[in-house]
Image (cartoon, rainbow, N blue to C red):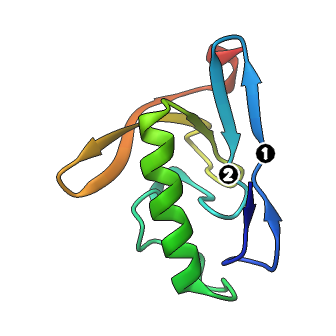
Amino acid sequence: MLSGGHTEAMVIPHIRYKDKTLVYMADLIPSSAHVPVPYVMGYDIRPLVTMEEKKKFLEYACKQNYLLFFEHDPVVECCSLQMTERGVRVEKTMRLEEIV
């Protein structure tokens, strides 16, 4: 997947492993705290595009039961998602070694 809000063409790899899809979030969603759509990096080149891309991606990722892997989160390595009345949110956090 390519994302154009943070930089011109940031790659968001989707890794299929066994029966799961792990998505390396790079700077689109750098930490679990950035899952809510309005929380974007302060230096995104097009923050409104980032928000639009995040919303579409998170809704799809939630439906597909994707697991997210965060590059910059000092505590949470990975998470599953759930749909709430306030949008997509973190459901369960886990370590990468629990997945593989």
Q: Residue at x 48, y 59 (%)?
A: 56
Q: Residues within 10 Å of mark 2 (few under 14, many from 20)?
A: many
Q: Residue at x 67, y 51 (%)?
A: 25
**Mark nearer the N terminus (2 vs 1):** 1
Observer-nearest residue: 6 or 64?
64
Mark 1 sits on what residue? 13
Q: Is residue 64 visible?
A: yes
Q: Is residue 40 visible?
A: no
- Residue 85 place in picture, x, y as percent: 17, 52
Mark 2 sits on what residue? 25
Query: Which element is circle 2 on?
Result: loop
Distance from Cα at disc 2 to Cα at disc 1: 8 Å
Tell me where residue 3 sits by quadrant.
Answer: bottom right
- Residue 49 place in picture, x, y as percent: 57, 80
Q: Residues within 10 Å of mark 1 (few under 14, many from 20)?
A: few
- Residue 80 place in picture, x, y as percent: 47, 33
Q: Residue at x 57, y 54 (%)?
A: 31
Q: Amino acid at mark 1?
A: Pro
82 versus 47 height, above or below: above
